[in-house]
Amino acid sequence: MGTGKFADEARHELEFIGEIPPQSCEKRGKDPTPAKTPPNLTPGSDPAAHHARELAWKHYEYGRYLAQSGWLERATKPLDRAIHLWPDEARFYLTRGLVRFDLGRREEAVADLKKAHGFPDSWVQRRAADELELMGEPVNGD
């Protein structure tokens, strides 16, 4: 892999999601443990879809890590990748919506939170509805 800022960021992301060995993570004092396995995944008849979901979950975990570390702008890319790989996971939209709101991207945040609210996951629906209400946005076309 090359050198420079973008190469370092790419290496860090690949180490975090477990795609390359974490030796440089250890040198920087980071936890080299790969991301957790996504919930409710059972290997089915489509191994490619299963792998895409696992990879999406790793990108989601990396995006959350970046956001919690205060790197909000950098957090959007792995969250975008997670949604691209697994567009049917409400938590991804909720998290990206909260990050976008913190970045001052209100319209994009509202769109993500409304998308998250549309999934049949009760805690995500409630959290998205609460956030939209705090923003003064209608929920379900109210």
Image (cartoon, grey):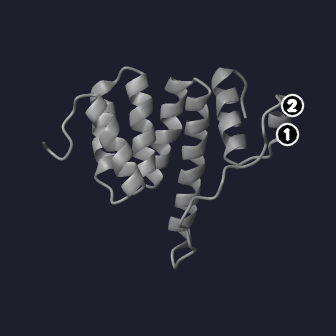
Q: Based on the displayed image, in which of its 4 quarters is residue 8 positioned?
A: top right
* Front one among 2 and 139: 139
Instruction: Name the secondary structure under disc 2.
Output: helix
For the C terminus, give its image quadrant: top left
Residue 98 numbered tag:
none
**Counting other residues with Cα less than 10 Å from the Cα at mark 2, is it few (<14), some (14-19), or many (20 or more)?**
few
Whole-percent x, y for residue 91 in the image: 45, 49
Q: Is residue 42 visible?
A: yes
Instruction: Name the secondary structure under disc 1.
Output: helix
82 over 138 or under it: above or below = below
* Front one among 41 and 3: 41
Amino acid, disc 1 = Gln
Residue sitting at 85 percent across and 36 percent down?
26
Residue sitting at 45 percent across and 55 percent down?
86
The residue at which mark 2 appears reads as 27
In this rendering, position of residue 70 left or right of residue 84: right
31 over 56 or under it: above or below = above
The residue at which mark 1 appears reads as 23
Do the numbered discs 1 and 2 sit on residues whose CB atoms are within 8 Å? Answer: yes
In this rendering, position of residue 109 left or right of residue 138: right
In this rendering, position of residue 74 left or right of residue 33: left
Whole-percent x, y for residue 90 in the image: 40, 52
Q: Based on the displayed image, in which of its 4 quarters is residue 114 positioned?
A: top left
Residue sitting at 70 percent across and 34 percent down?
12
Q: CA distance from mark 1 to mark 2?
A: 7 Å
* Front one among 50 and 91: 91
Amino acid, disc 2 = Lys
In this rendering, position of residue 105 left or right of residue 95: left
Residue sitting at 34 percent across and 50 percent down?
125
For the N terminus, give its image quadrant: top right
Q: Is residue 83 visible?
A: no
Whole-percent x, y for residue 20 in the image: 75, 46
